[in-house]
Amino acid sequence: MKHQAIIERAIQANNERKFFAQYPEHPKAYGDEGMAKAQDFYKNIEGNKFSELLQSGENAWGGEEVSPYTQKELNIQYPLYSVETLIGKASAAQNSWRKKTVEERADILIDALENIKNRFFDIAIATQHTTGQSFMMSFQASGPHANDRALEAVAQGYASISSYPNNVTWEKPMGKFNITLNKKFVAVPKGIGLVIGCSTFPVWNTLPGLFADLITGNATIVKPHPKAILPIAIAIAEMQKAFQNAGVDVNTVQLAADVSEHLITKELCENPSVKLIDYTGGSAFGNYVESLQGKTVFTEKAGVNSVIIDSAKNLDDVFSNLAFSVSLYSGQMCTAPQNFFIPEKIKNGDVEITFEEAVEKFKAAVQAISTNPKMAAGTLGAIQNEVTLNRVLNISKVGGKVELASIRVANEEFPEARTCSPSIIVCDAADKGVYEQELFGPIVLLIKTKNTDQSISLAKEMCANHGAITCAAYTTDENMAAKIEDEMSQVFAPVSMNLTGFIWVNQHAGFSDFHVTGGNPAGNATFTNADFVNRRFVWVGHRKMQ
C-alpha cells in the first residue's frame, strides 16, 4: 500500500485524540508562489466556464455566485446535469468502486487529497469570494483543515473495515470429527451517496461526508449551495484527476451544481438509488432530510450555542476572547456563541461586579475589535448573504434592548464589502422568546440570570429544545465546573471551559475534537467517530463447506 504510513499515523491520531495535522495550516508550508498563481486563476475564471471537471453529459451551463467583498457576480458557469444523468453515471461507477479493496480506495483517496493540497490557494480565494471568509480563514478552513477532516474519515473507515478478517477457516470440534467452514466477511457499501453543501463552509463541511462515503465504497454526488460552488468544484476536479490516474471511473464522484430557478436537491434526495445523505444547513430542510424513508442520513443543522459565565480570574481576558469568538467571520460559524448567560453578580478575581458592569466590559471588548483598523476587516470578513445582513440591520425587531448596534466596518482592499460589527442585545432570563432561536450572524444576546444555577438550567433547556454544537463556560470553582460539564453532557453539548488567549470555542480540531455530538437537535451525526463511517456499509458474512 503506497500510503500505508499516512494511514497508520492518521489511525493512531484518531485513537489518541492528541494534536496531529497531516496538512500544516500556514500558507508558507505550500510554497511562495501559490498566492500569485491563485490570483491569476481567479482573475481568469471570472466570467468563464469552469471546465476542469472530467464528468460529461451536461445539458446546460449556469451559475449565480456573488462575491460578498465586491458585490459583483462572478459570472462563472458550471455544467448542469439532469438527475437521471447523475444517478445513471453514479450507478455505473458504483459497480467498479465497491469492488476495490479498502487499501486501494485509501491510496486513491489520499492521492486525491494530495491533488487538492496543490490547489489550496486557488480554493482559498474561491472560498473568500463566495462565502465572505477572510483569506486566512478561507485558506485554513477550506484547505488544510478540510483535508485533515477528510483524512480523518478515511482513516476511520479504513480502521473499521480492516477490523475483521476477509477470510477465515472456522472449525468446530464435534468429538470424533470437526465441522470446517470457509467464511468470508464482506463490507458491502449501502449505495450512492449524496452530500449537500452549505454556503458558508462549502469545503470543510463537505469533505468529511464525501470521503466517508468513498472509503466505504459508495459512489457519491456532491450538491453544492448555488451561491458557493467554485471552492468544492476545484476540489472535485482534483479528485476526478486522481481517479482517472488510478484507472477508476471519474464519475465515482460527481459535482451536481444547480441554480435557484431549478434546484435539484429534493429530486436527488428522493431518488430511490440514493441511499446515503449528508446535509449541512438550516433545520427546516435538515428535518425534511431526516424524515426521508429508506435513507441513512447524517445531518448538521442549526443550534443555539450558549456561554455560561460564573466567575473568572480576569473578566477582561474572558471578554476579549469571547469578543473575538463572536466577531470571527461575523458569527457565521455553526460553533459561534450566541447566548451569554450572566448572573446578577459575578466574581471577577477578588472583586464582585454587577451584570451591568459585565455588559459594559463585553461591549468595550467588541468595540476594541470593530474599531481597530488593522484587525477589524480581517477578523469580521464579509456577510455571506443579504438575509443575514438584513437580520443584523433590523436588530431592533429581535426584541430586548439593543445595547450595541452594528456599524459598517471599512475594508480598504474591498470598499464594497458587506462587513459589519456584532450587535449586542440585553434581555432578562424571562424573555425566552427573544433568545430561544438561532440568530445566525453577528448577533449576541446577554441574558441576565439570578445565579449560575439558573444560567445552567436555561443553557441546558436551550440545547435540549433547539440544539447546540458548542457551549463555553467560565468559572474558578472546580465544583461548579464539574456541575456545568455534567449538566450539559446530559443534553449532549460539549463544554469548552475557561478558554482565553489564542484558542476559541469556535475551533474544532481534526483528529481530536468531535464536531457535533449527534445527540441534540443541532444534528444527528458526529464527524468523525466510528458511527460516521460504519453506518455507510453493512457487514455480510458468507459460509462455504469445505
Image (tube, rainbow, N blue to C red):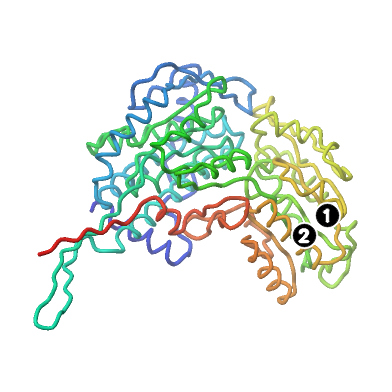
Q: Residue at x 72, y 54 (%)?
A: 322
Residue named by callout 1: 447
Residue named by callout 2: 458
| For residue 466, above or below residue 474 | above
Instruction: In this rendered view, identify the residue nearer to me: 32 or 327.
Output: 327
| For residue 541, above or below residue 257 | below
**Amino acid carrying mark 2 in the image:** Leu
Q: Residue at x 77, y 47 (%)?
A: 444
Q: Secondary structure at mark 2?
A: helix
| For residue 343, above or below residue 22 | below
Gap between marks 2 and 1 measured at Cα:
10 Å
Q: Give residue 359's position: percent from left, percent from top.
A: 85, 54
Left or right of 2? Residue 501 is right
Residue 251, quarter of the rendered image: top left
Instruction: In this rendered view, identify the residue nearer to me: 148 or 61.
Output: 61
Left or right of 334? Residue 342 is right
**Amino acid carrying mark 1 in the image:** Ile
Q: Give residue 469's position: percent from left, percent from top.
A: 62, 53
Q: Are marks 2 and 1 in contact (CB under 8 Å)?
A: yes
Q: Give residue 66's position: percent from left, percent from top.
A: 59, 24
Q: Secondary structure at mark 1?
A: strand
Mark 2 or 1: the one toward you: 2
Instruction: In this rendered view, identify the residue nearer to me: 340 or 90.
Output: 90
**Is the residue marked by circle 2 packed among few (<14), some (14-19), or many (20+) residues within 10 Å?**
many
